[in-house]
Image: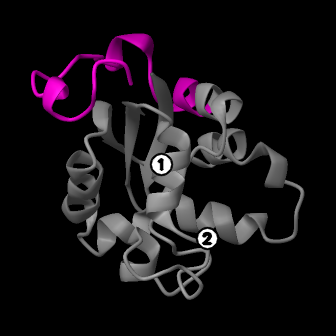
Amino acid sequence: MERSLILLKPDCVQRRLCGKIISRFEEKAINIIGLKMIQVTPELSKQHYAEHVEKPFYPGLEEFITGAPVVAMVLEGLDVIRVVREMLGATNGLNAASGTIRGDYSSSRQMNLVHASDGPDASAREIALYFADNEICGYEPCLTPWLKASDE
């Protein structure tokens, strides 16, 4: 099983789309094993976006991500990093295919509703920034045998 950090960004929270987006992950049979609402601080933003802090666009990014609460989640599933990123669609909502989360709900590059880890290393680092070990509750849903073959 693979894990990914997901942030339902301030635009998602403010637009009251969290339930719809969480439902998309649940309908895809992805396990939510951590979930909380938090206010991202400037310090956390700098840690999360460390590779962008010195770039000219960073101040606007920090202002956006700290502007309202986010919903942080840890998702778990087979190949979940790739699957979730495909479900999100292109970074810029104007370029995202219809049927993807961003294609259906976003028309912006920055205000694109959801952050998802882009690889296993980033996932591990990001999850550790947002969740303590005791805040992650791994489990096996009782309906798993009806969602995938036992050898998957």
Q: Is residue 56 left or right of residue 146?
A: right
Percent coordinates x, y for residue 85 in the rendering: 53, 55
Pointer 2 local density, CA inside 10 Å: few below 14, some 14–19, many at least 20 = many
SS at circle 1? helix
| Placement of 92 over or under 85, stated as above or below | below
Q: Is residue 121 left or right of residue 136?
A: right
Label 2 sits on residue: 91
Which residues, given as a range, are shown in magenta? 126-152
Mark 1–mark 2 distance (CA, rounded to whole Å): 15 Å
Residue at image position (81%, 55%) is: 52
Residue 144 in view here: yes
Color encoding of the figure: one colour
Percent coordinates x, y for residue 142 in the rendering: 10, 21
Residue 40 in view here: no
| Placement of 55 over or under 120, stated as above or below | below
Residue at image position (65%, 60%) is: 62
Q: Which mark's residue is nearer the viewer, 1 or 2?
A: 1
The residue lying toward the viewer, choosing from 69 and 141, is 141
Label 1 sits on residue: 83
Query: Image quadrant of residue 140?
Result: top left
Disc nearer the start of the sequence (1/2) = 1
Residue 35 circle label: none
Query: Image quadrant of residue 131?
Result: top left
SS at circle 2? loop
Percent coordinates x, y for residue 61 in the rendering: 66, 66
Residue at image position (69%, 71%) is: 60
